[in-house]
């Protein structure tokens, strides 16, 4: 039964993540943080596939997981592959809506946060910095959403340098929404 729940969390989480990225973030060159954010920067600059870049950029973290945290490796590999493929499959949805960029950044952040938080709640993830954040969270007993937020902020600042200041402002709003949503969904009950 746990296997089925985890599988559903990966599929539903990947759908939310893919919709958040394709429908709400990419039309306005808004960034998320972490590996997804780095992949978005690469997409905005060089038009390389976002999902494929997520896989490529996640390789070093998965190598670390293989040697140090094998359960995380196995729990995240499916999430990485499924979400990356869905992100690239949902690319045609990028022209679906035309709404205010600020509203889009909020909704996109909530959708991405739901996707990530849902997977993390069932001890899986998309890998990438979510996986790295999970390692740090377990070691330091800090909520994983807060760790993700700190990593995301660094990536968004980098994107503000390479893309635009407008991107920076909208992306800050997005990562706040991602961090809050992820924190709510992963809050540990004591």
Image (cartoon, helix red, strand yellow):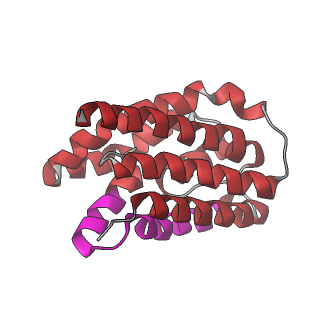
128 left or right of 51? left
Q: Is residue 139 left or right of residue 137?
A: left
The N terminus appears in which quarter of the rendering? top left
In the image, what residue occupies the spot 17% across and 52% down? 69
| Magenta stretch: includes residue 154 | yes
Q: Depth check: give the residue in front, 95 or 158.
A: 95
Secondary structure mostly taken by the magenta-highlighted segment of the chain: helix
Q: Nearer the viewer, residue 137 or 127?
A: 137
Please name whichever residue, 151 or 106, is drawn nearer the observer in this view of the structure: 106
Q: Is residue 50 magenta?
A: no
Is any part of residue 66 visible from this angle? Answer: no
**Which residue is drawn at the image coordinates 78% and 31% (left, top)?**
96
Image quadrant in which you'd find residue 97: top right
108 or 188: which is nearer to us? 188
**Residue 134 image offset from top left, x and y in percent:** 31, 59
Q: Position of residue 14 (x, y in %)?
A: 48, 37
From the viewer's perspective, is residue 145 above or below residue 112?
below
Side of 148 where 98 appears, left or right: right
Q: Is residue 176 above or below residue 87?
A: below
Q: Quadrant of the C terminus?
A: bottom left
Is residue 21 shown to the viewer in this render? yes
Q: How far from the left and from the top, in percent, is residue 66?
A: 18, 46
Residue range highlighted in magenta: 132-159
Residue at horizontal 44 percent and vertical 64 percent from the top: 145
Residue at x 40%, y 38% (from the top left corner): 9
């Amino acid at each position: 039964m746990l296997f089925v729940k985890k599988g559903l969390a990966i599929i539903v989480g990947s759908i939310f993540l893919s919709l958040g990225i394709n429908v709400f973030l990419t039309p306005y060159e808004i960034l998320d943080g972490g590996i997804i954010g780095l992949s978005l920067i690469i997409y905005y600059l060089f038009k390389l596939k976002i999902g494929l870049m997520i896989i490529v950029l996640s390789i070093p973290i998965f190598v670390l997981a293989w040697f140090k945290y094998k359960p995380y490796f196995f729990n995240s590999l499916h999430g990485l592959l499924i979400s990356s493929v869905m992100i690239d499959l949902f690319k045609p949805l990028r022209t679906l809506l035309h709404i205010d960029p600020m509203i889009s950044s909020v909704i996109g952040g909530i959708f991405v946060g739901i996707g990530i938080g849902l997977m993390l709640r069932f001890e899986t993830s998309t890998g990438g910095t979510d996986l790295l954040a999970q390692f740090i969270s377990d070691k330091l007993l800090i909520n994983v959403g807060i760790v993700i937020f700190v990593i995301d902020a660094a990536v968004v600042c980098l994107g503000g340098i390479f893309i635009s200041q407008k991107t920076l402002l909208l992306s800050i709003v997005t990562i706040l929404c991602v961090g809050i949503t992820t924190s709510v969904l992963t809050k540990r009950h004591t």
